[in-house]
Image (cartoon, rainbow, N blue to C red):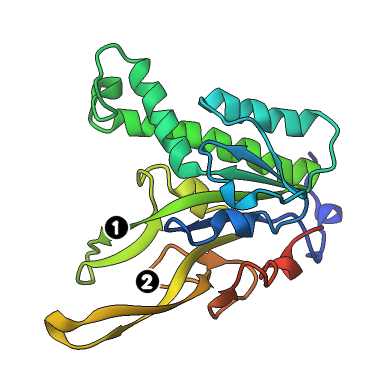
C-alpha cells in the first residue's frame, strides 16, 4: 500500500465496535451482548439459557476446541450472511480449552506450568493462540463490518507497582499474558457489576446492594476498564432498558 498525503482520511461516525465485557456470573453479560445488532454467538460454554426465546440471536454449536472457534470465525469471514455482531462467549472458558490442548500436546507436561519445558513457556504459547483468535475476530470488524464482543468472567489481581502500595483491581479471569489481547487494542472494556455500598464499621461492615446493575467502562485504578467514546461515568444497565452502547455501535 502506497503511503502519501493523498491517503489521509478524516474520522467518521459509527463504525464496527470491538468490545470486551466482563463480570461475575449472573450480571447479564450474555444478555447485554445479545442487544448488539443481529448477533451470532461462538460459544465455548453453554451460558445462553437467558436467551431462550430470543429470535434475534443465532448460536454456533458449542465449541469443544480452539479449532472450532477459528472455524466459526472463518465461516463468518468467507460465507454470505446478514449477521452484524459476533460474540465469543466466553474467552475465560476459551482460555481453559487452549491450555488443555497445550498440555495434551506435550507428553512430558501434566499441567500448563510444565508445558513447553516450564518457566512460563506454556502460558506464552497460550498467549500466542489468543493473539491469533483476537486477530481473526478483529478482521471481521475491519473486513466485513461486524461488531465484535468478547465475554469474560471477572477476577481480581493485586498490583505491586514500584511507586505505590500494593492494591487490588478487577480483571478478566485468565492468565496475565493473555489478557492484553482482549483489553489493549479494543474500543471498550466494560465491567458489569452490582451497585454496592457498605454499611457498618470494622468487623461489622457488610456490603449492601439493591440489585441495580451498572457498567464501568472508563479508566480507573480498581479495574482494567476503558473506552474510546469519552464515557466518564458509570452506565445504568437493566435487562429491558436496551443496549447502553447503542449510539456508538454500527448497525
Of tags 2 and 1, the one toward the viewer is 1
Q: Is residue 109 left or right of residue 105?
A: left
Residue with the mark numbered 1: 157
Q: Quadrant of the C terminus?
A: bottom right
Give residue 129's position: percent from left, percent from top.
Answer: 48, 31
From mark 2 to mark 1, how far is it between C-alphas? 12 Å
Above or below, 16 relative to 228? above
Q: How many marks?
A: 2
Q: Which residue of the protein is positioned furthest toward the bottom in this rendering?
A: 200
Task: Please give the name of the residue rendered at 51% of the width and 26% of the height, measured from the top-left corner.
Answer: 64
Q: Is residue 169 left or right of residue 230?
A: left
Residue with the mark numbered 2: 221
Task: Please give the name of the residue rendered at 47% of the width and 58% of the height, measured from the top-left corner.
Answer: 26
Give residue 97's position: percent from left, percent from top.
Answer: 44, 30
Give residue 121's position: percent from left, percent from top.
Answer: 31, 29
Q: Secondary structure at mark 2?
A: loop
Q: Is residue 96 left or right of residue 245?
A: left
Task: Please give the name of the residue rendered at 34% of the width and 80% of the height, measured from the top-left corner.
Answer: 208
- Along the line of sight, the residue nearer the viewer: 119 or 144: 144
Q: Quadrant of the N terminus?
A: top right
Amino acid at each position: 500500500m502506497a503511503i502519501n498525503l493523498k491517503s489521509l482520511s478524516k474520522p467518521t461516525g459509527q463504525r464496527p465496535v470491538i468490545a470486551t465485557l466482563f463480570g461475575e456470573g449472573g450480571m447479564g453479560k450474555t444478555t447485554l451482548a445479545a442487544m448488539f445488532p443481529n448477533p451470532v454467538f461462538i460459544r465455548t460454554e453453554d451460558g445462553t439459557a437467558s436467551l431462550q426465546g430470543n429470535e434475534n440471536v443465532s448460536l454456533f454449536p458449542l465449541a469443544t476446541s480452539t479449532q472450532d472457534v477459528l472455524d466459526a470465525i472463518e465461516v463468518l469471514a468467507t460465507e454470505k450472511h446478514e449477521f452484524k455482531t459476533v460474540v465469543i462467549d466466553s474467552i475465560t472458558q476459551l482460555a481453559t480449552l487452549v491450555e488443555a490442548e497445550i498440555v495434551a500436546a506435550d507428553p512430558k507436561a501434566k499441567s500448563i506450568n510444565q508445558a513447553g519445558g516450564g518457566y512460563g513457556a506454556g502460558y506464552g504459547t497460550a498467549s500466542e493462540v489468543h493473539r491469533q483468535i483476537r486477530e481473526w475476530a478483529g478482521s471481521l470488524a475491519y473486513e466485513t463490518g461486524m461488531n465484535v464482543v468478547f465475554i469474560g468472567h471477572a477476577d481480581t489481581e493485586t498490583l505491586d507497582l514500584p511507586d505505590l502500595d500494593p492494591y487490588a483491581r478487577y480483571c478478566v479471569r485468565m492468565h496475565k499474558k493473555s489478557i492484553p489481547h482482549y483489553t489493549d487494542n479494543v474500543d471498550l472494556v466494560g465491567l458489569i457489576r452490582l451497585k454496592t455500598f457498605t454499611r457498618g464499621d470494622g468487623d461489622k461492615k457488610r456490603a449492601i446492594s439493591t440489585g441495580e446493575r451498572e457498567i464501568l467502562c472508563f479508566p480507573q485504578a480498581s479495574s482494567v476498564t476503558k473506552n474510546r467514546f469519552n464515557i466518564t461515568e458509570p452506565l445504568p444497565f437493566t435487562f429491558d432498558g436496551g443496549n447502553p452502547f447503542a449510539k456508538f455501535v454500527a448497525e
